[in-house]
Image (spheres, rainbow, N blue to C red):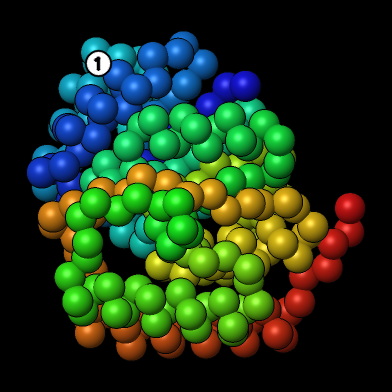
Amino acid sequence: MSLDIVIPAHDEEARIERTLRAYRIGFPQDDVRFHIALDGCVDTTADIVRQHSAADPRVVLHEFPKLGKGGVLMETFRRCDADLVGFVDADCATPPGELARMTVRAGEVDGVIASRRLQASFTPCARGGGRGLTSAGFAWGVRRLFRLPYADTQCGAKVLHRRVTERVVPLMSSRDFLFDVDLLVVARRLGFDVVEVPTVWIDQAGSKLRAWRDSTRMLTSAVRLWVHHRTMPIQDER
């Protein structure tokens, strides 16, 4: 099956070169494309992506004003036409081999999400105390608030059939870091089978997440999304 890999990026000039090099080598197939979705970048990220695009026509650059990670993912999904649509973070925390393994499993289900919290997961570089605590608390709250069965909604590696994104994205409301939660809530309510698999995940330096500052924003966004789905429920009409 053909594959479109979407990589959202906001001012990633220090990391996008390594990520694109790794993924181009890791996915040499002609039916794989790399969609780099720039979220209001003001650094040299676009120039680096253009260099890769000139060398490899499978690399496609999309430049957007500041829409948020979820916003640029939504817009880029609409431009994808492969059988499978995957997305990963720009820091290469998910090695290409892990995403390749997920695409194989995706042939059996509607979608696959990577998890850092399953027993078989391998995370050789542990997060700092503040980030780790915030991440664990958020995961616990999301599971209970939205009644999701997943241990890790926020791991930045997911693969879905295009038929899923075409149904799910128009019904989503979140364009910030609750994008992943919104995606999974809508997909489950539409009856799609999205499974969680363990992954190798390597924490990278340069994260823009600030644990204590962003924890309040995450909580506020989660409550807003919960209210949205309570007042505008989605029914499976298939």
Q: Residue at x 34, y 22 (%)?
A: 26
Q: Residue at x 73, y 51 (%)?
A: 193
Q: Mark 1: few, some, or many residues within 10 Å (few <14, many ≥20)?
A: few
Count of residue discs: 1
- Amino acid marked by disc 1: Ala
User: Can residue 229 be seen in this snapshot?
Assistant: yes
x, y (%) of residue 171?
Answer: 67, 62
Quadrant for the N terminus in the image: top right
User: Closer to the camera, 223 or 57?
Assistant: 223
x, y (%) of residue 173?
Answer: 57, 69
User: Can residue 222 be seen in this snapshot?
Assistant: no
x, y (%) of residue 147?
Answer: 65, 77
Indicate left or right for 169 with 7 as reference: right
User: Closer to the camera, 116 or 84?
Assistant: 116
Indicate left or right for 81 with 206 as reference: right
Helix, strand or loop at label 1? It is: helix
- Outermost residue, right side: 238
Q: Residue at x 69, y 58 (%)?
A: 187
Say which residue label 1 marks: 54
User: Closer to the camera, 201 or 208?
Assistant: 201
Above or below 43: residue 115: below
Q: Residue at x 59, y 84 (%)?
A: 145
